[in-house]
Image (cartoon, rainbow, N blue to C red):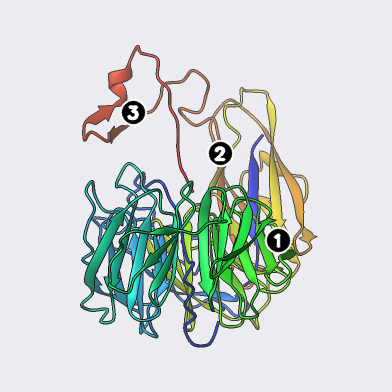
Amino acid sequence: MLLLLLHACAGPTKGPPVVNDSNTGDSGGTDTDDPDDTDTDDTDPDDTGAPLADGDNLVRLGAWMEDEERTLVETTGVLALDATTVAMCMGAQTLATFDLTDPAAPVRLATVPLPRPAGGFRCQHLATTGDGRLLVAHHGDETGPSWLGLADVRDPAAPIGLAAWAGPAVERVAAAGNTAWVAAHEDGLLRFDLSADTLDLPEPVLGVTGNVYAVAHRAGRVAVGTVEGSLFLVDGDVVTGPLALSGPVRDLAWLDDGALVAACGSDGLDRVDVDTLTVTAHADTTGTALDVAVLSDGAVAVAGWSAVFVHDGGSLALLGAEDPRTRSTPGIALAVEAFGDALLVGEWNGLLSYAWDPTVSAPEVRIDATRFDFGAVAAGEVDALTVVLRNDGPKPLTITGLSVADTAVTVDRAAFTIPAGGADFAELTWSSTGGPLSTALTFATNDPDEPTVTVSVGANRVGTGLGEMVPAFSYTALDSADVYTSQALGQPALLSYFATY
C-alpha cells in the first residue's frame, strides 16, 4: 500500500536585512542523479518565478542555478553580509559572494580565496564577525577535511583570505568582533581570538559537555546545542545548563525578544526563555528542521529538508510553507537566511529567493511526488492505494474534487475539508486486467495559486515486479571508474541509497 502526502500551507517579510550568525544547512551528498531536475513540475505555476495569485504568503521572486555544467550544487549556507550582498557556501565547489540588489537575479561577485587545507576544500556553514570578516566551517567528510577558515569580505567584490585551521569536526561557528565560538563535536565548544586575523590555539570553553553541534551568539551571550539534545548558555566564563530539548540540536537562532529558537531535526522546533532556561513553546515539523533564520517581523524561517517553513516566533504556530524548488521534489531545503524583502533558501542546486507577506493567510497545496504506483498487480486482483492529505497551513484546506481519468480506478470520496494542522484520507481502488496502468489523478482545491494539482498513477510498469530484470544503468564510482549493471550479470548485487541531512 502506498501513501500520497499533500501538504497545504500558507505563508512573504519587509524590513532591513536581518543577519543571523547561526544560519546553517547540512548535506552529506550531492544530487547528481538527475541533471535536469531543477524546475520541472508544470503543475506548479510559480516554478518559473512568476508572481503567484493573491493569497500566497511565500511568493517566489527568483531561482538562480549555475550553468548546465552544474558547478553550483549543495548550497549549504547563506549569510547576509550587508544590505545588498550575501556569501554563499556551495558544498564541495566553492565559497562566493553575490550581489542581491535584485533578489530575483543574483550576480556573482567573487570567489573567496581562502587558504585551503590539505585534502581539499568544502564549505558548510558561515558566520560574520560584524566588522567585515567572515568565518567558514566544515565538519569534514570524504570530499575534504574538517576545517575553519577566516576571510576579509569588507569589499565583497574583492575578498581576501586570511587564515585556515584544521581541527576536530567543525559543525557550526558564531562570532562577534575578535571572538569566534566553534561547535566541535566531542571536543566541545572552542573559543578563538581573532585579533591578529589568525586562527591559532583555540581555547576550550569549560562546562559545556556533550557532542556540541550548534552555536549562536547575541549581545555577549552564546547558546550551545548538542547532539544529545541539550542546551547550554555561556556568559563570559559562566555556563548555565543543560536544558533538555526535544531532540538533537541542528541550529540555533536568537529572537528579537531575547528568546531562542532551536531546530531539533525531525523532532521539530523549541522556543526557549533564556532567563528561566525553560521551553515555552514547541512545534512539530513535517520535515527535518536543519536551519533557522529570523525574519524582520519576528517570524522564524526553517529549512526543513522537504520544504521551507515559516513559524510564528512566539507560539511557533505554522504560518506558511513552500517547496523551494518544486512542490513535487522534496528533500532539498538546506539553508535559510532573511535578507531585506527576501527570504533566501539554499538547496542542492542553487539559491532561491522568496518574498514573505505576513498579512496573507491561505492554504497552499504541496505534493511530495509526481507519480504514485500500485506496483505489480496480477490480472483479476483488486488493489487499493491510500491517499493521505495533510493541511499544514493556518487556514482550512478544502478538496472540492478528486478524480481519476481512467474509469477503471475509483475514488471513495471526492470532496472534503481538512482543518488547519489536520489530515484526512481517500482511497483509490483498481481492478487489474494484468496490463499496465497509466492515468492521472487530479485534486481540485481552494489553494489560491493552485486550484488544481495533477499527478500520475500507474501499475504494472516494466521493472516493478519481484524477480524482474534490473533496468540497465551506469554510474561513475568514487575512484572515477565507470560501473555498469551488465558487469553484475550472474552475480549477487545489493542496491542501496544513502543520504545524510
Q: Position of residue 168 (x, y in %)?
A: 38, 48
Instruction: From the image, tell me which residue sits under label 3.
Output: 472
Answer left or right for 33 relative to 450: left
Q: Hey, what amino acid is under mark 1?
A: Ala
Label 1 crowd bin: few (<14), some (14–19), many (20+), radius 10 Å? some
Q: CA distance from mark 3 to mark 1?
A: 44 Å
Amino acid type assigned to the residue bearing label 2 in the image: Gly
Q: What numbered label is drawn on residue 458?
A: 2
Residue 280's place in the image compared with 431, above or below, is: below
- The one nearer the camera, 328 or 232, is 232
Quick one: label 3 or label 1, which is nearer the N terminus?
1
Residue 226 in percent (x, y) is at 57, 52
Name the residue beneath numbered marker 1. Answer: 283
Q: At numbered mark 2, what does the secondary structure look like: helix, strand or loop? A: strand
- Residue at image position (68%, 76%) is 361
Lower position in the chain sequence, tag 3 or tag 2: 2
> Residue at (71%, 68%) from the top-left corner?
317
> For the point 56% across and 48% down, which residue is it?
210
In the picture as drawn, the residue positioned furthest to the top comes out as: 490
Q: Identify which residue, 247 or 175, lies in the foreground.
A: 175
Going by the numbered disc 3, the residue's amino acid type is Ala
Left or right: 85 in relation to 307: left
Q: Nearer the viewer, mark 1 or mark 2?
A: 1
